[in-house]
Image (tube, rainbow, N blue to C red):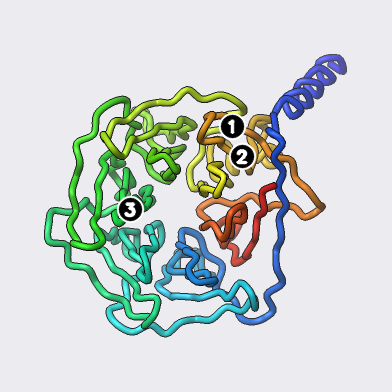
Amino acid sequence: FHILKKLMETKIKSTSESADSGGFSFSINKPLIEDKTPTGRGGSSVVFANGKLVLFGGHYFNEGDKFEYLNETWLLDVEKLIWHKISCSGEIPGPRYGHSAQILGSRMFLFGGKGPNSIVYKDVYFLDLVEWVWVPVKAISASPLARFFHAAEVVGRKIVIHGGWDGSEVFNDTWIFNTDSFVWIQPKTTGFGPSARYGHTMTLTADGRLLLFGGMSFAESGMPKYNEDVRQLDTDNMIWTRPRISGHVPTGRYGHTSTLLSDGKIVVFGGWGKSGCQSRDLINDSRAYSLQILDTKTMVWYVPRKLGHKDLKHLYNHSACKASGSTVFFFGGFDGRQALCDFYTLNIE
């Protein structure tokens, strides 16, 4: 028994040591914010514009063990570390979580999400970030079915969405929204596309590929299936492929975030999967890491080394956005027990 235990410990240790860092390291900082902060929440959205973090929506468990849905707009001045609750005018979107939000110029476009009483949205709004006015967008074409936890990314002046869930059906469709003409189109795609899923991410590379990672679906038995595959969509010819991947591939997960850095690396953080939070410190899986990096040129996965003594709390259904070349902002999310209101900065070196 003692020999077997020793062998298991050695195996776990060697697995840890074999996870190549690629020379990358990271440091985490949790700035002290003393003034009023937003309520802890998951499934919210954040974007970074003009030195400010713009937060919208989300949900959390209230004292009655029921979900409370939010439609507040908050602004964080990242220099002064002060949160401001913005009193927006116009037609404010209904409370929701699992929506998407993208910045184009001085507008933040919002699509979909899930709200109270099991309502699932298919609406589009934009928030004027100068006047702080919410404007409903009346699409002049057929639009995607209502959904939440879809993947979304900006390509030029357009927003591409894929997949999502409406509470019963998991989608595998791709749609493109033109932010100038307010027209939705459903492009014809070919190739080796992804399976239906939700809670995944889609990230645009510098050479025009949309990289899709992770997400959750359901097996025929009804059991959850957590995906760990990467698919890429060529935005010129709309052909899906499954690229050759190497390195320390992340465990299957959903509710993670993927953020592209200026050097072409994608930072994947957090997520929920088999047995819970995908961290080797929290589940019995030595392959699970909270933070990983994908080199989009070589398509190699790495596990960066942590610098300093500050711990990076594992999260899922949090929100993230790039702040600068190698800095990422995180806000909120769930840690497996509760919704959090923490703001973190992550630096990759």
Q: Tell me whether circle 3 and circle 2 mark residues in contact (CB < 8 Å).
A: no
Tell me which residue sits at (41%, 61%) in the image.
Answer: 97
Q: Tell me whether circle 1 and circle 2 mark residues in contact (CB < 8 Å).
A: yes
Q: Provide the secondary structure element on which disc 1 rests.
A: strand
Residue 241 position by quadrant: top left
Distance from disc 1 to disc 3, alpha carbons, whole Å, reads 27 Å
Which numbered disc flags the more N-terminal residue, 3 or 2? 3
Tell me which residue sits at (34%, 73%) in the image.
Answer: 127
Distance from disc 1 to disc 2, alpha carbons, whole Å, reads 7 Å
**For the residue marked with disc 2, what is the amino acid?**
Gln
Q: Which residue is identified by label 2?
A: 292
Going by the image, does 278 lie left or right of 65?
right
Tell me which residue sits at (65%, 55%) in the image.
Answer: 346
Q: Which residue is identified by label 1?
A: 301
When the figure is inspected, residue 155 is found, relative to residue 233, above or below; the finding is below
Residue 237 position by quadrant: top left
* Residue 71: image location, x then y, percent: 40, 72
Q: Nearer the viewer, residue 251 or 236?
A: 236
Q: Nearer the viewer, residue 212 or 66?
A: 212
Crowdedness near tag 1: few (<14), some (14–19) or many (≥20) residues, C-alpha within 10 Å: many
Which numbered disc flags the more N-terminal residue, 1 or 2? 2
Tell me which residue sits at (39%, 36%) in the image.
Answer: 217
Residue 301 position by quadrant: top right
Q: Which mark is residue 269?
A: none
**For the residue marked with disc 3, what is the amino acid?**
Gly
Q: Which residue is identified by label 3?
A: 156
Q: Provide the secondary structure element on which disc 2 rests.
A: strand
* Residue 275: image location, x then y, percent: 58, 37
Crowdedness near tag 2: few (<14), some (14–19) or many (≥20) residues, C-alpha within 10 Å: many
* Residue 98: image location, x then y, percent: 40, 57
Q: Tell me whether circle 1 and circle 3 mark residues in contact (CB < 8 Å).
A: no
Residue lying farthest to the left in this orientation: 141
